[in-house]
Image: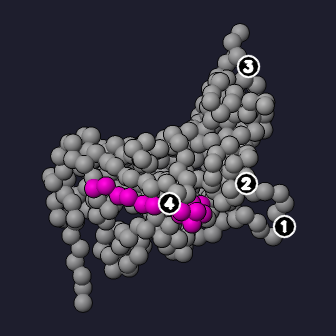
Amino acid sequence: MSTSYTPKLLFGDVRVGDRLPELVHAVTPTTVVLGALASRDWRPMHHDKDFATTRNGTRDIFINTPNNAAWFERYITDWSGPFGRLGRLSFQMKTPVFPGDEIHFGGEVKSLATDDSGCHWVDLDLSIEVGGEPRTVGKARVALPGDIADNPWQRKGARWQP
Amino acid sequence: MSEADTLPDVVRKLIDVPQYEERSEFPIEIGYVCNTCAAVQNGNPVFWDDDAAQAITGGRIAPPTMLSVWFRPHYWAPGASGERKAMQAHFDLKELLELPEAVVATNEAVFGEPVRMGDVLTTCQIVRSVGPIKHTRLGTGRFWTVDVRTTNQHGDWVGTESYTFLAYRKPER
């Protein structure tokens, strides 16, 4: 039996100012350690509380950079569906995320563009907040299909210009 | 002469020079992909389901944001001595500039050809800039930016990550 797959979200469905659905997650020590080890980051501030407090001066272990990126990617593709292809991601970790924090992901569509090759781009502002305080802020550029026959993952070379 | 002009020659000569070209220690494999997706509860079927991956991405791929995962060394390996560190260009700067602490200030990545199971990747590290001395809440130090450019076994560009670090010395208590 063959299964067909259709895009969850098309470029034409999106408007500037649209907000991505909020995602909330309660961070535990396991969240931090799992993320660090999955990203092969063995640095002790991501698994050793004594090291984090005495050497880094933080109150606990904290989420590492590649895991923060993985959380943003999950947040974006939860919204876009699997046909959404991430082209660019940048972020600034203003304050670490610690066990005990409840993280709230937010995102907003800032601009829409179609490049010379016909690739449809959505530029997003992103944030991770705890108790209303921005802990990480970022931006992303994601390609969405223009119609059900379009698939950004088939683009390469000059047809993929993130 | 300002403090900013006191960058040692040995550091200035590193700027814009590709260093530490290296291949990933193992072919890209699905176990790490599943670990990463599990850590953030990412249910995107292109990472979990062969049929969906075949239909959408032409086969299983790794999440683009895993780019840096593939060139981190194992914590230990036979015959290795001392702590093995990724991003050696960054640790070189810490040592040369005698700034023992560091945090990632910003991270930017641009993604090219998808990383597929079995790929063997090659990276190089390029110091793009080293800023003047800054006095920050954490201590006195410098910001610097290191790019990591990655290609696959076909020579296709798969992505570039730019890390801006704040490296610093904590104030003496």
Q: Amino acid at mark 4?
A: Val
Please say whether residue A35 is one of the residues in the magenta stretch.
yes
Q: Which residue is at 36% across, 69% downward?
A: B44
B153 on left or right of B9:
left
A35 on left or right of B10:
left
Rendered image: mark on residue A50: 2
- Residue A40 position in % (x across, y down): 62, 62
> Which subunit holds the residue at mark 3?
B
> Which subunit holds the residue at mark 2?
A
In three-dimensional space, the C-alpha distance between marks 2 and 4, rounded to whole angstroms, equals 19 Å
Please say whether residue B120 is one of the residues in the magenta stretch.
no
In three-dimensional space, the C-alpha distance between marks 4 and 1, rounded to whole angstroms, equals 37 Å
> For residue B48, what is the image quadrant?
bottom left
Specify whether disc 4 shares its chain with disc 1.
no
Q: Which residue is at 70% across, 65% downward?
A: B74
Q: What range is drawn magenta here?
A: A21-36
